[in-house]
Image: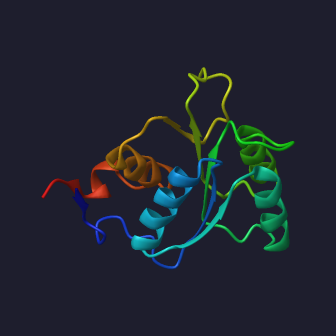
Amino acid sequence: MKFNKEALSLQGLRVVVVEDDCLLRSLMSDIILELGAECFAFSNADDALIDLLTQNGGCSLIIADHGVPGSIKGMEFISMAQQKWPEIPAILVSGFDLKAHVYISGSVYLRKPWTVEEFLSAIALALGSSPSQAGVGSS
């Protein structure tokens, strides 16, 4: 599978990823890096929050799995970040069927398991681009 990197460029962006599954965290990071963004990946939201505070919210996008270990879950992390920096878009990822009233309004919900097309579409949607601009296709 290939995707058009020019159709969804993240050049110059800083993306924070919170995912406890090492393989998924690595896959997300690789995709984000290939799209041109800096990626800072964490296995828990506690460490990601410390990073955000250190960077004074210097982040273009947050992608957080809800069911991560630690004292802060992904949904809470997104909520805390958006209270302090409401301009940061977010994607909440979960393998659980979270009801619409449970997750944070304004964030994009991405259900596990996801495909690369769904991941790219969620990024485009969160950043305010048309999901079709993700430029995903088979080779």
Q: Position of residue 44 (x, y in %)?
A: 74, 51
> Looking at the image, which is closer to me, 105 or 120?
120
Query: Which corner quadrant of the image does residue 53 belong to?
Result: bottom right
Q: Identify which residue is drawn at 16% across, 53% down.
A: 138
Q: Position of residue 64 (x, y in %)?
A: 64, 48
Q: Is residue 20 left or right of residue 30?
A: right
**In this picture, residue 108 sits left or right of residue 121:** right
Q: Which residue is nearer to you in this view: 27 or 92? A: 27
Going by the picture, which residue comes out furthest to the left? 139
- Name the residue furthest bottom: 12
Q: Position of residue 51 (x, y in %)?
A: 79, 67
Where is the N terminus found, in terms of image quarters? bottom left
Residue 127 lies, with reference to residue 4, above or below; the image says above
Q: Is residue 100 above or below residue 9?
A: above
When the figure is inspected, residue 120 is found, relative to residue 13, above or below; the finding is: above
Specify how the rendered protein is coloured: rainbow
* Number of callouts: 0
Say which residue appears at 76% left-offset and 51% top-offset. 45
Rendered residue at 82%/43% (across/down): 72
Q: Position of residue 139 (x, y in %)?
A: 12, 58
Between 13 and 27, the residue placed more toward the observer is 27
Q: Residue at x 38, y 70 (%)?
A: 9
